Amino acid sequence: MDSLAQNIQSVISKKSGVTRLTLTDFRNYAFLRMNTNLRPIIITGENGSGKTNILEAVSFLTPGRGLRGARLADIRRFTPAVVEDDYVPSNGSWAVSAMVYKNGEDFEIGTAVENSPKDEDDEISSYNKRIVKIDGQKAVSQGELGQYVSAIWLTPQMDRLFRGGSQPRRSFLDRLVFAFDNEHAKRTANFEHLYKQWYQLIKSTNGRADNAWLEGIEENMAAIGVAIAAARREQIARLNSFIENEPDDVFPNVILELDGTIEKMLDKMPAVDVEDFYIDKLKKERRNVLYNDSVDGVNRTDFKVTYKRKHMPAELCSTGEQKSLLISIILAQTKCQILYQGFAPVLLLDEIAAHLDNTKKEALLDKIKNLGLQAWITATNRDIFQTLKNDADFFEIKNNMVTQL
């Protein structure tokens, strides 16, 4: 066993993951409780039975908007009246809670959404507010969840990740960064808020907003934006170094790059000078806002992936190759987290067998087993997981009911 394998084995002996998951008014589940072990969890059922909803619930135990990126209001339980004549729809509230095991300790974490009126006298207009609790105590922000659970997911929608717009790739990258930098989630949220404020202020005043006000927003955007770019660069360098020195034996090696103005500027000058550059750039970009043109910055950075052996950009690869490239990135990220963070991420793999040949499917399952990972895996047919029959928990979904097999 080489030194890398020995180091990983010394960490994964301290298993981590979700040992109890409870859903209330979440998607198709009025109430669901699953007790699980720290090993692969196979969830099977017909299409539309609610398999992905369980994975989405686990993803909400981490910072962000979950694996679907859904609006909070859209996650509430909804059952058509034709199914249950006496059904009373949820008022918009839902909750996900879990018992999490990490580094020899149990933690109870949870997140919920409450439908609250905008003011005491307004009974109609309302907003959805997400709250987070850790061991019964309300957290300051959802970013604190990152200290207890880290999750990486792969869904069928991501099979087209390299062929669509840059936003999904940017979100995928930022989730990789979250695992090593808990503040990154807060920074990206703050930047998005400032950007909307800046954009709307310019549009609503036709470019005549108070200059001092705009400059204040731009200074904050530049400072946060440079920090976001620096964190992305650090993560890309970490993963590239790991992949170069520890290539996978089955899945293809990749080269990762950032295609962004601010990230590239950090290659040429100190961060403080890049901030000044970004401030000047934002001032010049005000005109683009008025003409509805795109505004360049960290909110437009693209995440580029190349199949190293073929020297081929990921977007030109076959569907199966693209999925293999994604798995290669996920495996490298997972091993990095195990080595440098001291605990493994939870993998959420939705319909993972699609577009994978049998050799790669079996190789992935074998790596999950050998790395000691808790992986929540969905499929319509449990027979394809025979190699894990003694090493996984199996569940089946029928009629909104989850049964352990």
Image (cartoon, helix red, strand yellow):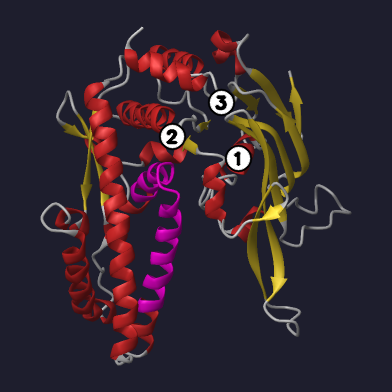
Q: SS at mark 1?
A: helix
| Count of marks overlaid on the render | 3
Q: Which of marks 1 and 2 is nearer the N terminus?
A: 1
Amino acid type indicated by mark 3:
Gln
Q: Which of marks 3 and 2 is nearer the N terminus?
A: 2
Residue 404, compared with residue 89, is above or below; it is above
Q: In which quarter of the image is the N terminus?
A: top left
Q: Name the residue under label 1.
A: 58
User: Percent from the top left, x then y, of residue 393?
Assistant: 66, 19
User: Percent from the top left, x then y, of residue 48?
Assistant: 63, 37
Q: In this view, does 332 lie to the left or right of 122?
A: left
Amino acid type indicated by mark 2:
Gln
Nearer the camera: disc 3 or disc 2: 2
Which residue is farthest left? Answer: 268
Q: Mark 2 points at which residue?
A: 341
Circle 3 residues within 10 Å: few <14, some 14–19, many ≥20: many
- Tag 1–tag 2 contact (CB < 8 Å): no
